[in-house]
Image (cartoon, coloured by chain):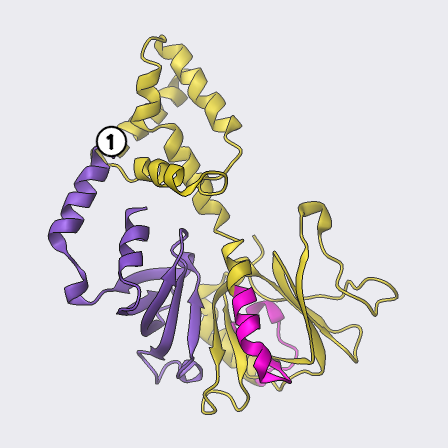
């Protein structure tokens, strides 16, 4: 996962058009908003520009400097908000906090952002998007919400899948198998479970499977031991 | 999933969400989804000296994965109900 903001220069056409998206990985454009200025950290606003929101990331491209553009993955946006308080920022805007992956240095990175023009954009922790027409703020906010929900944490899902496989209910169904076969079956399940929990299932199903994940500590202990046994047998 | 349903019951109540970067935001719980993404309305940053930029935002979407704690209204916790629900889940539904 790429955290933080990055420079973005790949434009379609003669370098004047839309950003080149990763369509091979099912990235698609969700919304385009022209007339948007971008403010990185405490730097001066950059404008005019156009905002491109895909189902994976937010891209801002300058309308004047074709070499200038920035992108940030939704996975790296910790929070976003509509800011209309003139004390916080003179113009109404979308405010976003960006996770940089260098949490300990967040404060020093911020001060860098204020005084150093040549800074590494990957250390930027705050971004403001200022539409020239503030009436677009609510719809932009809603699109940000929608896209954020399309990008749940990939690591957590993997972890949950893993726990699910070793839940006691699944094991008891195969009580008739001998232990070695049972172990193999678990590993096959582990490889075949393509769908992350919560994606393909209806709400009820989801509730059930997640419910199985949050079982008592004791059963989690058992599952852990079981996992070790399986690994031992495979060695 | 228990917490998802539980937080849904708290919609409309005042909560404080503490993020892993130590930012704490108080606001009215507008909605919550299955990933525990949280939407707050009429928010205020608890420690305003430290985060002056965030002073007040109308609505705010917080990514579930960056939440450390959610502070609940004391009367929003039905201990008995929660106790029963967790026990039911422990039995596998």
Chain identifier, purple in the render: B
The mark tally for this picture is 1
Q: Where is residue A19 in the image (x, y as percent from the top left)?
A: 75, 63
Q: Residue placed at 52% from the left, 27% from the top?
A: A192
Q: Residue placed at 45% from the left, 88% from the top?
A: A85
Q: From this viewpoint, which residue is outermost toward the right?
A: A14
Q: Where is residue A29 in the image (x, y as percent from the top left)?
A: 68, 59
Task: Indicate yes or no whether the magenta region holds residue A16.
Answer: no
Q: Please tell me whether residue A67 is drawn above or below residue A226 in the rendered image.
A: below
* Chain assignment, label 1: A
Q: Please tell me whether residue A49 is drawn above or below residue B73 in the rendered image.
A: below
The answer to which quarter of the image holds residue A67 is bottom right
Q: Position of residue A134 (x, y in %)?
A: 58, 84
Q: Residue placed at 50% from the left, 30% from the top?
A: A193
Task: Check the picture and name the quadrant holding the C terminus of chain A.
Answer: top left
Tell me the element at label 1: helix
Question: Is residue B7 shown left or right of residue A114?
Answer: left
Front residue of A118 and B79: B79
Q: Residue placed at 46% from the left, 22% from the top?
A: A187
Colour of chain A, in one word, is: yellow
Q: What residue would you read off at disc 1?
A: A219
Front residue of A22 and B29: B29
Q: What stretch is highlighted in magenta?
A: A115-144
The answer to whether one can see residue A124 in this image is no
């Amino acid at each position: 996962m790429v955290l933080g903001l990055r420079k973005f220069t790949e434009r379609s056409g003669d370098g004047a058009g839309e950003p080149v998206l990763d369509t091979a990985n099912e990235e698609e454009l969700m919304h385009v908003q022209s007339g948007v200025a971008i403010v990185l950290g405490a730097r001066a606003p950059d404008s005019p520009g156009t905002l491109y929101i895909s189902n994976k990331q937010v891209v801002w491209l300058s309308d004047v400097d074709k070499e200038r553009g920035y992108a940030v993955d939704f996975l790296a946006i910790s929070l976003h908000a509509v800011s209309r308080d003139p004390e916080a920022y003179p113009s109404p805007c979308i405010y976003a906090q960006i996770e940089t992956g260098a949490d300990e240095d967040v404060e020093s990175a911020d001060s860098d952002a204020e005084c150093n023009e040549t800074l590494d954009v990957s250390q930027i922790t705050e971004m403001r998007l200022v539409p020239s027409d503030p009436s677009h703020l609510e719809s932009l906010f809603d699109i940000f919400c929608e896209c954020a929900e399309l990008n749940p944490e990939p690591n957590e899902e993997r972890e949950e899948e893993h726990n699910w496989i070793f839940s006691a209910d699944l094991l008891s169904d195969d009580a008739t198998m001998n232990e070695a076969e049972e172990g193999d079956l678990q590993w096959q399940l582990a490889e075949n479970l393509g769908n992350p929990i919560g994606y393909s299932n209806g709400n009820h199903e989801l509730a059930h499977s997640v419910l199985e994940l949050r079982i008592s500590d004791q059963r989690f202990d058992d599952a852990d031991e079981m996992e070790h046994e399986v690994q031992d047998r495979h060695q | 999933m228990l917490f998802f349903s539980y937080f849904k019951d708290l919609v409309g109540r005042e909560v404080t969400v503490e993020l892993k970067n130590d930012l704490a935001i108080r606001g009215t719980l507008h909605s919550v989804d299955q990933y525990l993404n949280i939407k707050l309305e009429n928010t205020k940053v608890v420690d305003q000296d430290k985060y002056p930029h965030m002073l007040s935002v109308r609505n705010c979407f917080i990514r579930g994965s960056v939440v450390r704690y959610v502070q609940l209204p004391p009367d929003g916790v039905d201990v008995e109900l929660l106790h029963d629900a967790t026990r039911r889940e422990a039995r596998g539904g």
